[in-house]
Image (cartoon, rainbow, N blue to C red):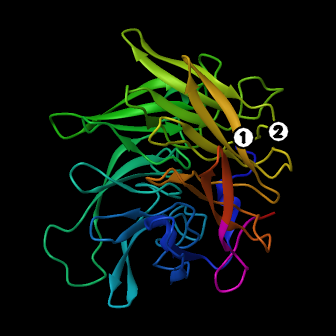
Amino acid sequence: MLRTNPQTAKVESILLFALAVMLAHSAQAQTYTVLHNFTGGDDGGGPLAGVTLDPSGNLYGTTPAGGYTGGTCSHGGCGTVYRLKRVGSGWTLSSLYSFHDTDGNFPIARVVFGPDGSLFGTTNEGGYQENGVVFNLRPPSTVCKSVLCPWTETVLHEFGGNSDGCLPYLGDLTFDAAGHLYGTTADCGQALGTVFELARQPSGSWLESILYDVDRDGVGEYPLNSVIFDTQGNLYTTTEWSIDPSDEYGTVIQMVNSPSGWTGTDLHVFSGGSDGNTLYGGLVFDHAGNLYGNSFLGGEYNGGTVFELSPSNGGWVFNVIYNFTGTGPWASLSVDAAGNLYGTTTGSGAFGRGNVFKLTPSDGGWTYTSLHDFTGGSDASIRSAS
């Protein structure tokens, strides 16, 4: 099970920030700006997930707390989905939806846009069985002239536990070319993690299929993040633990489809030492087909690692490309068109309060740059709470 529950990750000043580098060329200067300070009320609180951009430059995200406080919501509210829209020289936050527990509770993954332009996401808890849900949000059918215009939520699937899985945790949903949804669950009963597919039916409903039990082939336990596709249609993800209870340090797995179903293979089983320990983040591909990810612990200084898996002669070559000295990353990396990697840590940086970093390919190695070191003041900080 998750050693450090995402519910204990606190953002002290509870804010949303934008770092211009995430959207800019690497040669440009970076500017850190606070866009919104969350109050924990109707606007939400304690965001754990990243944000999603629409074509107009608006930002969409989730908060696990805030919003509706009735029912069995136990985190200071059941959580919200919000939009930040640029208005003049500032930004205006609109709460698009507030969860009510039976329709979802505690969203800790991003929302993503589907082929139809509406939003899709998961909640880690909630639903009538409290195992989490997959949901869809659509804007009002008429033009809304107020910031208080809630979107319409539809629960596409409610996880039932046991073989159906539960607790989708931190993983974003992924669409394939046919418009089918893919994601992971981390735990429940006889399933120590699943990869699922939701396929839209002619009637408009969604049919769930469990593609893979990640512990079935002995490839790991508890996938906490999303799956990604390669160009051949294979799926990749990480697990927090390895399958061996005495060696619970995490794995990177590849899943290949065949007429007899999906088969999983370990690309790397972590030792808990110099290669890393405990994988909360997912994976990203660069344009050359290399995989990148990070570990929360382990490495040369036991502060976590950034690693690379490169395809070679039908196999994969593993390399650690950076070792953190503080506390490592929770979230997945991002990669830009030039192959630079970006990420955040929970306790590294100049003040030990977390930072935003960049890794640049350079002369066969990587150059590390801290883009912003959180101070714990008005710019916030990221830490693991006791």
On the image, the x and y values in percent for residue 273 come to 84, 37
Q: Badge 2 local density, few (<14 within 10 Å), some, or many (20+)?
A: some
Q: Is tag 1's residue or tag 2's residue first in the polypeptide sequence?
A: 2
From the image, tell me which residue sits under label 2. Answer: 274
Q: Secondary structure at mark 2?
A: loop
On the image, the x and y values in percent for residue 353 come to 75, 71
On the image, the x and y values in percent for residue 49 come to 53, 60
Residue 148, by quadrant, is: bottom left
Q: Is residue 293 left or right of residue 323?
A: left
Q: Looking at this rendering, what residue extends furthest in the bottom direction?
A: 89
Q: Residue at x 64, y 81 (%)?
A: 379
From the image, tell me which residue sits under label 1. Answer: 320
Amino acid under disc 1: Val
Residue 220 at least partly seen: no
Closest to the observer, 274 or 286? 286
Quick check: marks 1 and 2 in contact, CB under 8 Å? yes
